[in-house]
Image: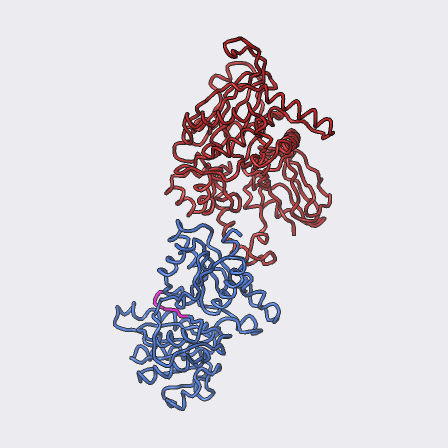
Amino acid sequence: MAEVMEMLALSPTMEEGTLAEWTKAEGESVAEGDILAEVETDKATMEMESFYSGTVLKLLAEPGQTVRVGDPLVIIGEKGEDISGLLSELGGGGEPAAKAKPADTEAEQAEDAPEASESAPAKTSDVSEAAGNDDGRRIKASPLARKMAEDKGLDLASIEGSGPGGRIIKRDIESAKAAPAKAPRAAAAAPAAELHAAAGISEVPGEQKSLSQMRKTIAKRLVEVWQSTPHFYLTMGIDMAAAMKVRKDINAQLAAAEAGYKVSVNDLIVKAAAAALAKFPVMNTGFAGDSLYAFDEVNIGVAVAIEDGLITPTVRNADQKALGAIAREVRELAGRARDKKLKPEEYSAHTFSISNLGMYDIDEFMAVINPPDAAILACGAVKQVPVVVDGELAVGTRMKLTLACDHRVVDGATGAEFLNELRRNLENPMLLLV
Amino acid sequence: MREIAFRDALNEALAEEMERDESVFLMGEEVANYNGAYKVSKGLLDKFGPRRVVDTPIVELGFAGIGVGAAMGGLKPVIEMMTFNFAILALDQIVNHAAKLRYMSNGQLSCPLVMRGAGGAGGSLASQHSQSLEQQYAHIPGLKVMMPATPYDAKGMLKTAIRDPDPVIFIESEVMYGMNGEVPEEEYLIPMGKGDIKREGADCTIVTWSRAVHWSLQAAEIAAEQGIDVEVIDLRTVRPFDKAMIAESVKKTNRVIVVEEAWPMASVGASVAEWIGRELFDWLDAPVGRVHQRDIPMPYAYNLEPLSLPSAEKIAEAVKKACYR
């Protein structure tokens, strides 16, 4: 019996994916677990594995085509099997996934087709609901989940469904109110971000290019965050002379020991920030609608520029890791980030983020908070600048840090105290080694 | 408490009601001299004599009509259909007469008749003798339909059915006659239209009746091993069914599976599921699940029959699905 495989959600926030490449052709045999296709998600290019063994009977999308999660992608069955019935059921491939599923994959028992249609009313109802919604943008939620969301003032659009076809169910609503990661800014105050074209854009001649999945997600999320999160900024100059000296010593010794890696200024900042966060847990907190969510882990997202966007691979439990471990981990994650090979769990679950434009010689800048974090640290370049020491002009080594804070979670004084602790760590870099 | 068989519980109910009210009599194929095809009427002929325990020829339409007439005339007949597969022959008397008399006579007539007998699959009895036909009666306004799942319920429910002023269809699962269960010595009645929670649970409700109660209870054990806490409601009366009990349970569990031995199309389970979907819409976290017999005539082959019927495994799988596990 031929099986239809649908576009899978390959990242937690993926709603649609662009088929980059088929790695199997029609007529080719495939085993369960074989790579069928490469799919560009909003975060990375991911390999999609086959759930079934058999022969690829029909590819339902072309490379470059965008396919919504749950929509049919490929039919796998026995060689020579007649799939005309299945194809007409699919109605050309663009129909909602529910239609695509042959009855007996649905039922409580795979081989039990006659019962299947009845025992799985889930799909029956999905079909009729989806039929009138060809754009696929309709939010699927169980009746109970809808009611709970309404009672709690949660916006379903901001909640990810974990049920079949992305249906939002009871447990999604429950975790949405508990964990800010899912929908910290779901409260009525934050209208769902819509992507509007900039005013007057068509008055100038130009070429229109469609957004990549990553660009789309960045656009959507940043509008959402910027509109819903009251940012305030604190900038502080740090004396980096001692830190640069320590770094130089460490790297010289690492080179002598042929360790194969170096410690960067950013690694020092990650370590210093993690240590400061452990001391100021209030900065390691997310806004959760009607509550604050204090994270148990200090996980630092490190912004990495990649082709056509950026991503924040996460160093988990950074406060418990040695400087060298952090250096190696950041290097390894950033490398795979540039190749778009990060796994979802490697770029989520951050509790604080760091963005560094020092290598571009930027003095200072203001960053946009990366939810669910309450703050993000923007780092400028380490520079030789004139400074006043004991009333005398001297040459100093300075770096400017700008902390962006979510004012719903922390206030100016808290942010300032945290920055001072961060400065203490960086200006006394031996603290980072103990 | 003493344990007796399902058939003996029914026998006691008949004997007690015949003792209590001399207008009650039993009629049907082989109920008297042969003591009943399933021995439900064992000893009743000796005890109450041939005027009150009456053997009939093999003419279902005829003796159903005699039953309706006797009920109109003031008696309280208990008509045994050897199995409900044969009651199809008597449907005109049941649907067009028994069910309609009170309404069409503007309440001048009533029909306090009980039609009881075996239903459902019995094990390699083939497609004509393995049917669950409660839907045929539950569909009809003017009829009540009771389907016990335990000896205790069987006795208390049959006594209630006999005392009811209107026609009651009372279907006993063919495979349950030998099932033992606790039945107290003292008299008790089980109210019409009242379900029974056979197992309490918090995560998913199974609504069922008759033989499927036992599959469902086994399914609950399987689900429990996977950490799913299942509540099993035995409707006992399928028309009218206990909406309040279902509502209370579904509001607690948010998930529900309707399990029945019958076919899926236009069945009692379909109606119960439809009612839940409509009335409890806002309480549902998953579509109303259903498990039922395959939509085919029952195969004669002994190995195919259980594949066609619901099973504990199929029900447990449906529960899992409803719980998104």
Q: Is residue A416 above or below residue A13?
A: above
| Residue B295 visible in the current orientation | no
Quarter containing the C terminus of chain A: top right
Residue farthest along the front direction in this orientation: A390
Q: At 53% across and 14% down in the image, what residue appears?
A: A204
Q: Is residue B145 inside the magenta stretch?
A: yes
Q: Colour of chain B?
A: blue
Q: Is residue A184 above or below residue B179?
A: above
Tell me if A145 is positioned left or right of A395 in this view: left
Is residue B231 visible to us here? yes
In this rendering, position of residue B240 left or right of residue A160: left
Q: Nearer the viewer, residue A222 or A95?
A: A222
Q: Is residue A12 above or below residue A103?
A: above
Residue A371 x %, y %: 49, 32
How many marks the image carries: the answer is 0
Q: Which residues are magenta?
A: B141-146
Looking at the image, which residue sits at the far top?
A393
Instruction: Say if the magenta span includes residue A39.
Output: no
Residue A179 in picture, x, y percent from top left:
47, 40
Quick check: A180 above or below A417?
A: below
Q: Colour of chain A?
A: red
The location of residue B68, given as percent across then percent down, is: 35, 76
The quadrant holding residue A346 is top right
In-front residue for pair A323/B94? A323
